[in-house]
Image (cartoon, helix red, strand yellow):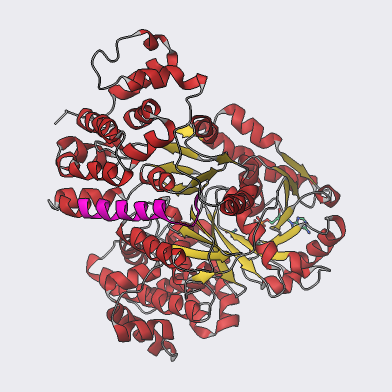
Amino acid sequence: MDGYDTVAAVTDRTFRSLGVVGAGNMGSGIAQKIAAEGFDVVLVDLDDAKVARGVESIRRTLADGIARNILTKEAAAAILARIHATTRFEDLADVDLVVEAVFENLDVKKDVFAKLDRVCRADTILATNTSSFAVSDVAAGTQLPERVIGLHYFYHPAKNRLVEVVAAARSTPRSVADAWALQEALGKTPIRSKDSCGFIVNRFFSPWLNEAVRLLEDGVANIATIDAAAKWGFGIGMGPFELMNVTGIPIAAHTANTLGRAFGPLYALPDPLRQQFESGQPWSLEGDADVSRYDAVLDRLLAAVFYVAAALVDEGVGTIEDTDIGARVGLRWRRGPFEMMNQRGVREAAALASEFARRWNVRLPDTLLRQAASNVPFRLQLVTRTITDGIATLAINRPDVMNALNEDVMEQLGDLFFLSADDPAITGIVIAGTGKAFVAGADITFFITNIKSKTVDRIVGFTSAGQDLLLAIERCRKPVVARVHGLALGGGVELALACHYIVATPKASFGFPETGIGIYPGLGGTQRTPRRVGKGLAKWLVLTGQIIGAEEALAIGLVDLVVPYEQLDKAVRELVARGRPDDREPQSVPASHRALAEFFERIGAEGAGNDATLADPRVASAVRRMGSRAPIAARIASELIDRGTGLPIEDAVRLELERLEEIFSTADAYEGLSSLGTRRPVFKGA
Ligand SMILES: NC(=O)c1ccc[n+]([C@@H]2O[C@H](COP(=O)([O-])OP(=O)(O)OC[C@H]3O[C@@H](n4cnc5c(N)ncnc54)[C@H](O)[C@@H]3O)[C@@H](O)[C@H]2O)c1
């Protein structure tokens, strides 16, 4: 094992119904999210009025979703129907996990946990959403502290994906692993925090707010300037003062008080914040921003964050990567603290943080000192390795960009893959994504940047190295399994196809969007797809960009197995035990897809697209979809599929490299890539 490895318990627990205690701001949102993901949920509060208020707030959020066309009336009704709102704790008797979200008062929480002890099954996991108490303290009064953990959600918990998963002193690894898997199944982005006051995110967020207040106190700038500078520097929609007005000055004051008690004056409540809290008034945001003060403001805000982020890593509260993910996903900062330190240069970051440390008469954390001494950027581990029972799981850990592949990810994936392939103690390798997606393709910004700077050769280099890695995966003597939960698009499908087995959850989906953005799959998609599903269906997938669900992927042979989320680990272990499969023949086309396969088999050949199969509604819809694709990309992709037939895979994938310069130099590629996510591209066939 190397320094990046973690050990995790295997999880195969089935969660059927869940409970939430406290139907306030957090509890109602948590219950809504759970129900939206298809689980039954029991929501408990003290009296009927409070229960009704919680349900009403869920109803309002759902109505908003309907108004914004992101939810149908039927889906909203189904979500509400899965929520059983009640005042009876006894109704929690049969739930698998309970999240406590009652007032932030230790006695109230302990009392709730004592009740849960009495009413819940002995194997029910009990989680607290406390923001400021130690999970161990909340657990202290229970009969079975082993099953108590922390699940710290962020407002609004039905929308904000971040959750800090906290192991308390006595929590079993199994409880933590099961709860973690459940968060992923719920589409959340979990990060792991030690049971330490403020966990990861509030630990640096609160000092960031405090520093904003102190900038005001020290007369460095007015509120309008501080907010504007923070918005600009951190890439956020609201500055610290506006944010405090919206989320509540009492919460900000309470957090600072708690952290101050735990970690000393640097974290404590600044006087102006105390006064504002006592006045009961929001901050006045009036005034003009003074651009000339932005740098002075930013340097101090960054200094506070750099210092605290490094300190929490020193203390083992969280990793560098989880700290960054916490900032990006939980607070929606453009970059995490460590990415910002790298951007600034670690020496300069350390110099800024030293100023802050000097003001508070504290020592610079070792994490930052060491890095500054070496003067190389922090290495952000974008792929993690977990070894369980001799199986190495390599998980791409960029959940906020759906684990998109870039040069760093591919390099780290390669390093960990070869490390695992060469280690005699490892019997199988699993490739997975963190969070709600497997891999949603390659990093589009990398392509755009290189097209603009006329360095398409870097795209060719990236693709060629990627092909090498995928060939090595395919040739590996140990079984390699792709573990697909959520979206697998483009490069994600190609990565999965290089593995010996693909096991997916019902929430997985697969597709090749490339020809819709002016390019074609370059990591073996035009070659390995036909080897799995036959030429006709491969052309259908690549030339139409049709996204298919897990069951359809199973039916046509694109994946090997579909199992519920909680059985993924078990399925993976069984596949590893089976060993590497022999060379596979494409699966025969199921009746449901025969017309499609026949139609697309003939694409590129003479007389294609002019026959009886067009009467088939799926073929007709596929033809319509093809109409919106980039014509050059589609033509090359079709040719590549034809030319690769019968070639050894090593030669076949190289065909994809030959046309890359050409495709990335087209106007359509630039149009398709740069329009992604903003508008429908207009392709000119040039
Ligand atoms: N608000 C946030 O942004 C935020 C973020 C993360 C975590 N938290 C934490 O979540 C918890 C809840 O916060 P909130 O903002 O939702 O509070 P809230 O005041 O909106 O809701 C608390 C709810 O708990 C209910 N309650 C109180 N005692 C109860 C009991 N004994 N049995 C059943 N229900 C009871 C109350 O009636 C109320 O409806 C706190 O621990 C808080 O620190 C809050």
Location of residue 388 by image quarter: bottom right
Residue placed at 31% from the left, 42% from the top? 648
Q: Is residue 189 magenta?
A: no
Q: Nearer the viewer, residue 380 or 409?
A: 409
Q: Quadrant of ligand 1?
A: bottom right
Residue 485: horizontal and vertical position, in percent? 53, 46
Q: Is residue 68 visible?
A: no
Q: Nearer the viewer, residue 45 or 686?
A: 686
Residue 208: horizontal and vertical position, in percent? 44, 71
Q: Mainly helix, strand or loop, the magenta region?
A: helix
Vertical placement of residue 579 versus 589, above or below:
below
Location of residue 231 by image quarter: bottom left
Residue placed at 28% from the left, 69% from the top? 343
Residue 19: horizontal and vertical position, in percent? 73, 50
Please provide the residue range marked out in magenta: 460-482
Q: Is residue 95 visible?
A: yes
**Left or right of 219 on screen, residue 189:** right
Residue placed at 81% from the left, 71% from the top? 141
Circle count: 0
Vertical placement of residue 342 versus 643, above or below:
below
Instruction: Tell me the quadrant of the picture where the C terminus can be found.
Output: top left
**Left or right of 186 on screen, residue 314:** left
**Left or right of 675 on screen, residue 387:** right
Q: Is residue 463 magenta?
A: yes
Residue 399: horizontal and vertical position, in percent? 45, 54
